[in-house]
Image (cartoon, helix red, strand yellow):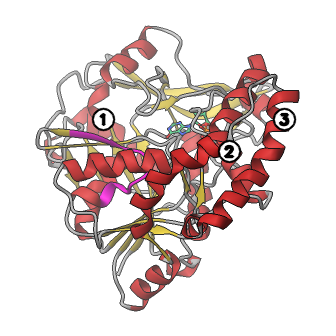
């Protein structure tokens, strides 16, 4: 049975939620493996639109069991809000949702730290989502994190929170000139969400190992994208986890040799939210048109996304990093009314042509993209659900990308709805 990872091939927001929703109909398990409520996975079906931040996007199609893995950082208050939202749509979460006891919590002090640190960075700010992601992973790695298992023992939980707050309050007051956080109030606020979450907490690694033994189909859902990976992305303008394939293993407990497929999701163009280098960014009418056609505003923060042409140097890098053996192309319809469409095939750096994605952000800032230009198809592709019915010029565009990368598109998405999908 397939154990497939769905990974963003760009800077996030590639439309992974829709793809996971589609593929989950054939999956026994859908597993989120990293990130937190910084992600916003938008799902559209029937007359419903829902944005999931923590719960896997497999919750609404079929009966797959949904797992929030150990690699995710969980804001309990955001999680409870989301559980209520999903239940209000008639979904019974009991025996469908399983949350790792080893996952770490995002507590209010992480969010405060995220925001004060961003403020103190001034013009070097990363442009985080402000959801406390970086500081929560810092707590985890510095071994002072609080895990979901700690919610089971009230005394231990309170002791850990007080201890952490002692240090954090010293920093808040003396380094950042901020008010200290009151431990008692924080513990009290946490109480209600703890009781709601407790029934879902379990050893998800064990659960997934049993699923592997039983030869069940598993879909691993990445958040953000390869170029935001803390090791392989555009550091320091990255998130603090590993959206790439390796992160799927550490964030779920599934061993690398169990993975059968790595599917990369790429838009037909590029977007990025937050700061950092973006070689093909368009600060002109075409960029504005991509933003308008594609409704490119952050699902979590509402920020306008930066837009640009598809970057095949970056895509090939993501393919190699993750061992992607299949691709999905999303938002093809956004290009429907462009007279010409460009894709970046190479960079020029210091007068030399290169197809290497630089590891150094300053170099990436300096590259000049070299483009191949295509004639637009100038007709709507919305609702088209068979490959043959796509306009020939759109097929030329798709074929070029497949040949350039050497990886086939298994799915092409022509609109936000489930029906607006070509599965090949
Ligand atoms: P953080 O993950 O909130 O720390 O933000 C770090 C960087 O990742 C910022 O540039 C964010 O805009 C970006 N980022 C985080 N989550 C997402 C996402 O789900 N989609 C796109 N960008 C994201």
Q: Is mark 3 within 8 Å of ligand 1?
A: no
Mark 2: give few (<14), some (14-19) or many (20+) Cα within 10 Å.
some
Question: How far separated are the C-alphas under marks 2 and 3?
Answer: 15 Å
Mark 1 — residue? 332
Residue sticking out furthest to the bottom: 213
Read off the magenta span.
49-58
Mark 3 — residue? 171
Mark 1: give few (<14), some (14-19) or many (20+) Cα within 10 Å.
many
Reading the chain from its start, which is encountered first: label 2 or label 3?
3
Q: Is mark 1 within 8 Å of ligand 1?
A: no
Q: Is residue 388 above or below residue 181?
A: below
Tag 1–tag 2 contact (CB < 8 Å)? no
Left or right position of 160 against 254: right
Mark 2 — residue? 183
Give SS at disc 2.
helix
Question: How far separated are the C-alphas under marks 1 and 2?
Answer: 50 Å
Residue 281 inside the magenta-drawn segment = no
Q: Is residue 56 above or below residue 78?
A: below
Q: Quadrant of the N terminus?
A: bottom left
Left or right position of 348 against 315: right
Q: Residue at x 11, y 43 (%)?
A: 46
Q: Is residue 245 above or below residue 65?
A: above
Residue 269 image point, x, y percent: 43, 32
Give SS at disc 3.
helix
């Amino acid at each position: 049975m397939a154990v497939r990872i769905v990974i963003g091939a760009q800077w996030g927001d590639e439309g992974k939620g829709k793809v996971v929703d589609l593929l989950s109909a054939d999956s026994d398990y859908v597993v989120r493996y990293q990130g937190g409520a910084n992600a916003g996975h938008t799902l559209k079906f029937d007359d419903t639109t829902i944005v999931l931040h923590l719960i896997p996007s497999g919750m609404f199609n079929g009966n797959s069991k949904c797992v929030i893995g150990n690699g995710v950082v969980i804001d309990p208050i955001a999680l409870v809000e989301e559980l209520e939202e999903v239940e209000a749509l008639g979904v019974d979460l009991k025996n469908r949702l399983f949350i790792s006891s080893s996952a770490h919590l995002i507590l209010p002090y992480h969010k405060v730290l995220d925001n004060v640190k961003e403020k103190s960075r001034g013009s070097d700010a990363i442009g985080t989502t402000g959801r406390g992601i970086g500081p929560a992973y810092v707590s985890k790695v510095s071994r002072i994190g609080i895990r979901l298992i700690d919610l089971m023992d009230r005394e231990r939980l309170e002791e850990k929170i007080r201890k952490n707050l002692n240090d954090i309050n010293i920093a808040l007051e003396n380094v950042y000139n901020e008010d200290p956080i009151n431990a008692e109030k924080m513990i009290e606020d946490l109480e209600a969400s703890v009781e709601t979450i407790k029934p879902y907490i379990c050893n998800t690694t064990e659960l997934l190992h049993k699923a592997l033994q039983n030869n069940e189909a598993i879909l691993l859902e990445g958040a953000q994208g390869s170029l935001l990976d803390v090791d392989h992305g555009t550091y320091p303008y990255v998130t603090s986890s590993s959206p790439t394939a390796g992160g799927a293993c550490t964030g779920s407990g599934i061993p690398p040799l169990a993975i059968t497929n790595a599917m990369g999701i790429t838009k037909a163009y590029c977007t990025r939210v937050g700061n950092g280098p973006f070689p093909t960014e368009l600060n002109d009418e075409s960029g504005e048109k991509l933003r308008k056609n594609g409704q490119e505003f952050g699902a979590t923060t509402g920020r306008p996304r930066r837009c640009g042409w598809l970057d095949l140097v970056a895509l090939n890098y993501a393919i190699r990093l993750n061992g992607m053996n299949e691709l999905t192309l999303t938002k093809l319809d956004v290009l429907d009314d462009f007279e010409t469409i460009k894709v970046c095939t190479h960079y020029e750096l210091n007068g030399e042509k290169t197809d290497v994605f630089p590891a150094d952000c300053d170099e990436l800032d300096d590259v000049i993209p070299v483009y191949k230009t295509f004639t637009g198809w100038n007709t709507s592709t919305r609702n088209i659900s068979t490959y043959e019915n796509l306009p020939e010029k759109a097929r030329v565009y798709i074929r070029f990308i497949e040949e350039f990368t050497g990886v086939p598109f298994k799915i092409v998405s022509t609109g936000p709805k489930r029906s607006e999908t070509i599965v090949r």
